[in-house]
Amino acid sequence: MSPRPDNGRVIPLPLLPHHSANRSSVTCKYRCGNACAHEAPNTSDNAYFGDIAESVLSRRKALKASGVVALAVGGAAALTSTAAAVPAPLRGQGRSSIPGTDFAPVAPNTEDAVVTAEGYEQGVVIRWGDPVVPGAPEFDFNNQTAAAQEQQFGYNNDFAELIPLDGTGNRNLLVVNHEYTTETHMFAGYDENNPTEEQVRIAWAAHGLSVVYVERENNGGLKPVPSQYNRRITLNTPFEVRGPAAGSDFLKTSADPTGTKVLGTQNNCAGSKTPWGTILSGEENFNQYFANADSITDPTAKQRLARYGLKGTTSTRKWEKFDKRWDLAQEPNEANRFGWIVEIDPHDPNSTPVKHTALGRFKHEGAAVKVADDGRVVAYSGDDERFDYIYKFVSNGKMKSGNSAYARRQNMTLLDDGTLYVAKFTGNSPASEIDGTGKLPADGAFDGTGEWIPLASGDKSFVPGFTAEEVYVFTRLAADAVGATKMDRPEDIEPNPVNGRIYCALTNNSNRGSTGNAAPDEANPRVGNKHGHVIEIDDDATGTTLRWNLLLVCGDPNDPGTYFGGFDKSQVSPISCPDNVAFDRHGNLWISTDGNALKSNDGLFAVPVDGPERGHVKQFLTVPHGAETCGPVVRDTLVTVSVQHPGELDGASADQPASHWPDGGNSQPRPSVVAVWRKDGGEIGRR
Ligand code: FEO
Ligand code: CA
Ligand code: CA
């Protein structure tokens, strides 16, 4: 990419060392077990658009005859926005007429710093190792212990949420996921082949979640305060397994013959706050922690392991040396106890967190809930792997109002009982017009209709050849069997609280269209999709039909294969590899990125989704080099982001740190949550 002028400055973009398309080899190895270096685990011959065009057309005719299409079109008239309909934006310095997005965009850069829009201030809220539980010791990098880590902020913060404790906005619970550990950056002199038991136990304690009471400071930032709410959840914390697969033989181990109690949660990636005040969090790349999948010989068991990327002999972190539960040869079912959506009640530090089997088992990025008009709740979730699927769960029960402990307890059972679906997306343009470059089809939009295919409800399976239990525990295989649409890594998927539509980030898929892999289709229209896209879904919440369109086809706006909601591409910020999504109170979409393939640092972007500036993407901040922007929270006068894996560049380690963020000097980099506010205390995105 050539240097881009932005804000009147021209910033050269030096090449960073990269492993696969856009992440360092150390991030690929420790974050997702080098998933991108392997063939995607979805080898099902599940049909793609080229094969099904005829049947789609016949089905569309059938739908039209039944009136379903006409109804859906009427409900989604606002979905398509063309360039012709967009008036010129306010010119200069990224001016915007849309509340919440009027700030001067940050230019792409590779600085070892958080860079915010002009006029904004920043401060670290909490770092890896900072005390969480009252009485926790201060962090000491060179003398870290598992006992200390159990009480301190975990590693590699990802999803974050601020739960207000009152109406002032000043008292909040900050809830944060700790997705994975990078031992080469956590321990000086780390020997990958011979980790010590203490290092392994520190890693167990550095996973999970933190709940931290935070107060707004006078200067605008957030400060952690010792509190009875503060809590660490780690790989040692007991969880209750609930829903239709609780107690299944597939979940039983020698340590838990009931199949209902699991120690810990791991690879917690994205998440959300439920409308009843709890937190949902997704267990994502759990497969990389388990050793000796190759010792399993039973063909059915082998196929199930392979579909979840469980393979090989020793694991990267060698945990199997210190607890047999990580050894599939000794505990073949332990891996079935991860890959779930978990729910915690941050208001009650003594509550037992829950694993919800009714939402299926896959590499859950996260889950987010929308309340349907009739009070039932709908949880959307993406399976973050190349060629995997988008799911939703519709509860049978209805949400109880109020935020009492009783209501929360009752509402925490909503996700135990309902129907699990997987999505199938159908384009409305001829397949011949989807040429793999990102060029828009003749109707001017990547768009179409879709359906939710039921997989199971309670103990009833809708998938031939699968029991309900098998659907929940081996959900990927069940979804293969019903012809779900293979997507380009579905990450965060969340409902917009203002317009009600659902937005899903599809990060990238370098294998799209390559030999032996699914061809581009209208919902995933680019071959070797390096930069990802964002799909907007108008969903019949509790029903089975939907309409969709691609809001963004990401990348360098100078690339003709990109699309920014029909907005003038000369006015937008480059964006690559969308990952997490959030909304401000105006309904603007905020997107954080993971692995910018344009060779600049990851960032946080704001984009209006309705009105004349739909698609006007602007970069609000960037994170230090080697880092990923995660877990954005956008409030009226405050933005927070998780800065994950700062300094994770090829060749870097604790012995040779490539970043000194956030503490500067010769310090070790520390994953941290950062708060950003306007210097004058005013509203975010207003000038
Ligand atoms: Fe952990 Fe899908 O990112
Ligand atoms: Ca179309
Ligand atoms: Ca993510």
Image (spheres, grey):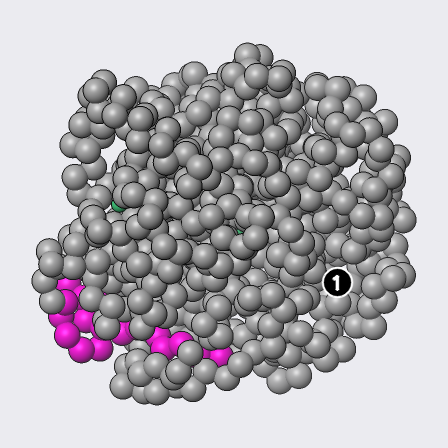
Q: Position of residue 508 (x, y in %)?
A: 48, 56
The image quadrant where one finds the N terminus is: bottom left
- Give the left or right position of residue 151, taking residue 79 as reference: right
Frontmost residue, 683 versus 444: 444
Which quarter of the picture shows residue 335? Answer: top right
Q: Position of residue 506 (x, y in %)?
A: 44, 51
Q: Is residue 453 above or below residue 648?
A: above
Label 1 sits on residue: 183
Name the residue: 78% across, 56% down: 316
Frontmost residue, 685 versus 533: 533
Name the residue: 50% across, 53% down: 512
Q: Is residue 425 visible?
A: yes
The amino acid pointed to by label 1 is Glu
In the image, is the residue at mark 1 within 8 Å of ligand 1 by its beta carbon?
no
The image quadrant where one finds the C terminus is: bottom left
Residue 105 located within the stretch drawn in magenta: yes
Q: Is residue 239 above or below residue 632?
A: above
Q: Position of residue 515 (x, y in %)?
A: 57, 53
What's the magenta region?
Answer: 89-111
Name the residue: 58% across, 48% down: 516
